[in-house]
Image (cartoon, rainbow, N blue to C red):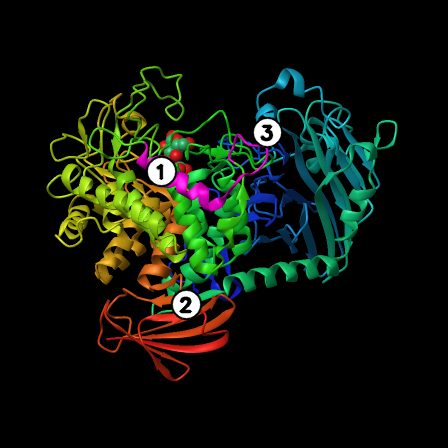
Amino acid sequence: MQTNKTNEQFGYFDDANYEYVITTPYTPTPWINYLGNDGFYGLISNTAGGYCFDRDPKFRRLTRYRYNSVPLDNGGRYFYIRDENDFWSATGRPVNTELDEYSCRHGMGYSRFNASKNGIATQVTSFIPLDTKAEVHSLVVTNNNDTEKTVDVFSFIEWCLWNAEDDGANFQRNLSTGEVEVEDSTIYHKTEYRERRNHYAFYSVNRELDGYDTNRESFLGQYRGFDRPQVVENGQSTNSFARGWSPIASQHLKLKLAPGESQSLEFVLGYIEVEVEDKWESKNVLNKTPAKALAARFDTHEKVNDELKKLNDYWHNLLTKFSVDTPDDKFNRAINIWNQYQNMVTFNLSRSASFYESGIGRGMGFRDSNQDTIGFAHMVPDKVKERILDLSATQKPDGSAYHQYQPLTKKGNANIGGNFNDDPMWMVLSTTNYIKETGDFSILDEMVIYDDQEEATHDHFDHLVRAFNHVVNNLGPHGLPLIGRADWNDCLNLNCFSENPNESYQTTQRGASDVAESVMIAGQFVLYGQEFVDLCLELGKFELAASCLAHVDTMRSTIEQHAWDGEWYLRAYDSRGEKVGSNENEEGKIFIESQGFCAMAGVGLDNGKVKQALDSVEKHLSTDFGIMLNQPAFSSYNKYLGEITSYPPGYKENAGIFCHNNPWITISEAMIGRGEKAYEYYSKITPAYLQDVQTLHKTEPYVYSQMVAGNDSANPGEAKNSWLTGTAAWNYYAATQYILGIRPVYSGLEIDPCILPSWDKVNVKREFRGAQYDIELRNPNGLSKGQIELNIDGQSVEGSIINATTYSGQHTVVATLV
Ligand code: BGC
Ligand code: NOJ
């Protein structure tokens, strides 16, 4: 692996350490990282902005963050450093004092900030240790001067009053509820603990304090921002005590540093839950025993380093289950490090909390979470199984599904409800992908409740049958699937007809006899319906397979008959029976989703329709920055189409490059053997390739963004909504299973690449069902796709599948493309 220091603008990749190094606090948008793996999470920007929460970012938020604030990125874990002359931030902001040195290294589950000023160097390392409900912030201060220095350190965090929505809205109450306790060097946050809460938070440091503040106004001073707190300016804490208003935690530590001396401070921001009967130590004094035990796990620099090492090992282990070495460094970097890392973040958070998803609106999405699993089934199969079964339990008896569930309760979210008719079939994708990865068919036998049940009476397989039948039972006038509220495209609201700005497009559906039909769901049904048929055949359920196949075949011909527009597939029929995504339309003549799904499903593969649809995508939708969702963009609002026409042209679902769906085209191109096209579409949206245009691209160069502005926008190429996007899982899936073509199938690992002809050799390391394969893919004739000659441990093997039952342990595979 290499380090790419060329084209450095705001930072560079340090691949050997699995890090991205940011070299300025003033990136075009806050460039963030995620901390935490198992229920307790933090979002942390390149200047330590962000917040942390336990499981649910709405109901259990520990620290306060101000979304869309002025200036941007306000609220975080701040360390103010003060010498005799000056003060600054150890993490680059919020104090804007220019530093002599600054860097932020975002790594796997940790971020490290280096700063120096006036010969005082600091390093803050922030992470959430494995299996721990706490952020650890380890601060090392070094005096590089040749005289002794006294340095004041002021820590700062601001408590969120737990319910993030209430915290930002219900001020008549919450300015009176804040409560804290202070004991030794720890500040305890216990708002609402006197009543129904059995949880509190604390901020501790492993050294005696020279003062503290717990009241925000006392620390900042009136009408001052985080950039110049009064206390820091004065150099002395006020020992303030918060009673209501806005409680904070700030510790003041005076360090005397000899020349060359370093001292370290270990801060712990922890979350504690206690049994109701153990809440109190004495009247109104909270039980601090568990907090002290938690803080004690990190009360020396050695202990903290040991935990950091465990975290590094954990990630190393996860990331080396699949790694690749192609002639293309950027491809390698994306696959080996950042794409897999982002996949895990989408596993943990679905679409709930990012710097663009405020953590109060959306739970875990049914559609999104099922799709996300294709990005990490090889890394955390057990967690995938659990996730799929959690999702399954939010399915309704008729096979439809709650669109979202809340992570704390794992119950379907009634505010959003269901009727997004693409939802059910995604569970066929997640389940079959999981079984192909693991060989574990037992997931199908797990008993899972339907949402309205107390006790499970049916197994997960039955849930898949009902998912399949939900499509069959909800067909429209042309025999195509009814769209319901929306399909994958949340903004194609064909049954909403909204003229009221106070109404939600997502939850409004009018009329009992909605007839709008979706060609995307039709393609999805053929693709995953066929998967379901194959699964039934694997299980020896031949009758069921045959009857399902009949439905799938019917859908294939229905698409060819009613959903082929001449040069591409239609997108839908609206509530009036009018075509959407047709050459006959003035705007929105062609859409990407139905091309992707019908092509992946191979509808019309043998009569040229797939190729023609893909050629139309290239002709009408492809840009320098990826493939646009539709063209021409909608220029005015159309209530029959809904939210899609509410966006200005070129943004979001209205002709933006909505990256999530681009891999569907990449996969389709790979399926028909066009390796150069597949690579082109893959790389156009992969951030590792966008280093040179960061000022335009704006979002983090190490993770996918949901949307890149399209050609109709004011700024084509400008990205938005980084991190929580299905693009991560899908582009990973496209690259590994269709470009590299290392594809789990029921019997083993199939090798069926579609690569750049110029790639003469590719090496892949792949853990699979307990065996380790060292695969060398040879391409002596400069092909994209072809027959595979397989040789395992020196023996030539028939076919292109490594049979999983034959192998365990370590094996060397040579696959030659001929
Ligand atoms: C966005 C969609 C999103 C939906 C659901 C819409 O405003 O454009 O991308 O899926 O909201 O939250
Ligand atoms: C983002 C949503 O999370 C996802 O569910 C949806 O498919 C896309 N937007 C497209 O609308």
Packing grade of label 3 (10 A; few <14, some 14-19, many >=20) is many
Foreground of the two, 20 or 278: 278
Q: Quadrant of the N terminus?
A: bottom left
Residue 240 lies in what quarter of the image? Answer: top right
Residue 725 visible from this viewpoint: no
Q: CA distance from mark 2 to mark 1?
A: 40 Å
Packing grade of label 2 (10 A; few <14, some 14-19, many >=20) is many
- How far from the left and from the top, in percent, is residue 352? 50, 37
Q: Is residue 772 magenta?
A: no
Is disc 3 placed on a helix, strand or loop? helix
**Residue beneath label 2, please?**
324
- Against 177, is 24 above or below? below
Going by the numbered disc 2, the residue's amino acid type is Val
- Against 171, is 374 above or below? below
Q: What span is in magenta?
A: 450-473
Q: Nearer the viewer, mark 2 or mark 3?
A: 2
- Against 716, is 513 above or below? above
Q: Is residue 467 magenta?
A: yes
Find the residue positioned furthest to the right. Answer: 282
**Residue beneath label 1, please?**
469
Is disc 2 placed on a helix, strand or loop? strand
Going by the numbered disc 3, the residue's amino acid type is Ala
Going by the numbered disc 1, the residue's amino acid type is Asn
Foreground of the two, 717 or 240: 717
- How far from the left and from the top, in percent, is residue 631? 20, 37
